Amino acid sequence: MSDETVYAIASGKGGVGKTTTTVNLGTALAEAGERVAIVDTDLGMANLAGFVSLAPDSTTLHDVLAGAASTDDATYRLADNIVAIPSGTSLDEYAETSPEGLREVVDDLRDQFDYVFLDVGAGISHETVLPLGLADAVVLVSTPEPAAVNDTKKTIELTERSGGDVAGLVLTRTRSGSDISHDDLADRLEVPLLGTIPEDPATRESVYAGTPLVVFNPDGPASVAYRRLAAELTGVEILGPDTSDGGEPAGEKSATQTVVETVSSDTASNENDSDDGREAAPDEVSSAITEAESDT
Ligand code: ADP
Ligand code: MG
């Protein structure tokens, strides 16, 4: 598990907590001192941009994939140890991108950061499938609802066909007292259960505050669960917040508020080919999509 550093955060169904998981796993590791990059590979329906409050004409992953910018140009610092590479939100930009360039972006980031998280779009389009094969391991995200869990099967199948590996399942928005067994859901998919993230109203509040949940409400149930998940997934030791009783840690919050700032690119970019044989050939990916579509 320890030599996995690039994770795709994927789901069959949309709206299950992929972006929340990407941002908070990344932030939990950054707080533990790891250098982290999070990438919005959901090219058609980007929403990581909401976390970095970009100006409309900012350089994004779309420009990189269109060959008009470097990865560094689209890299924005979020807080200490963590950067984001957002996607653009306009359809015109989307039409000009070629997802194949993502392989180079991932190789670039793999060399520069300890951990890379790819926030993958839901569904079975080409841009969704490609990251599954580029990552060292795929983290499946689902709510405990049967329909969402069912849709996860397709993501597992697409991962296998694109030459990727499934790390396991994360169940989000779980509620105590429900009669669904989380272990049974993972067993049904034949994948390990990596962790569960409870329903927590602070999650939505953290989005409005523009601050990752694990910073916004570090002692809340979902934050605790995300730190535990980050440790479980990577093997990095992650300590909980210092829960001294009483006072609000108001002063500390502002220090970690989202800040937009292009990362200066004086780190010499590493030119060596770190081809570890995980990449799926483009035609394998296309046929995986075609096969998956004809399954429905
Ligand atoms: P996705 O990226 O899969 O589309 P998001 O991460 O954007 O999903 O989450 C979808 C919605 O669910 C958001 O409004 C988010 O705030 C909310 N949400 C995610 N996880 C939780 C949770 N553990 N508790 C409460 N709400 C959550
Ligand atoms: Mg999302």
Image: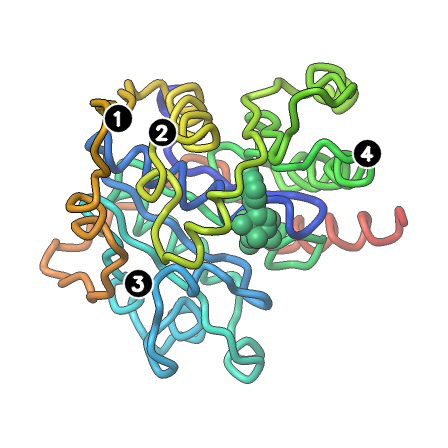
Name the residue carrying label 3.
71
Gap between marks 3 and 1 measured at Cα: 33 Å
Q: Earlier in the sequence, mark 2 or mark 3?
A: 3
Q: Earlier in the sequence, mark 1 or mark 2?
A: 2
Q: Quadrant of ligand 2?
A: bottom right
The numbered mark at residue 146 is 4
- Report helix, strand or loop for mark 4: helix
Q: Residue at x 54, y 22 (%)?
A: 195
Instruction: Say which amino acid is labelled 2.
Output: Asp
Q: Position of residue 215 (x, y in %)?
A: 31, 41
Question: Which of the two residues, 137 or 42, is positioned nearer the viewer here?
Answer: 42
Gap between marks 2 and 3 measured at Cα: 35 Å
Q: Is residue 281 at all visible to an observer of this figure?
A: no
- Report helix, strand or loop for mark 2: loop
Instruction: Say which amino acid is labelled 3.
Output: Thr
Residue count near mark 4 (Cα–Cα under 10 Å), binned few <14, some 14–19, many ≥20: few
Question: Which of the two residues, 164 or 186, is positioned nearer the viewer here?
Answer: 186
The numbered mark at residue 241 is 1
- Report helix, strand or loop for mark 3: loop
Gap between marks 3 and 4 measured at Cα: 39 Å
2 vs 4, front mark: 2
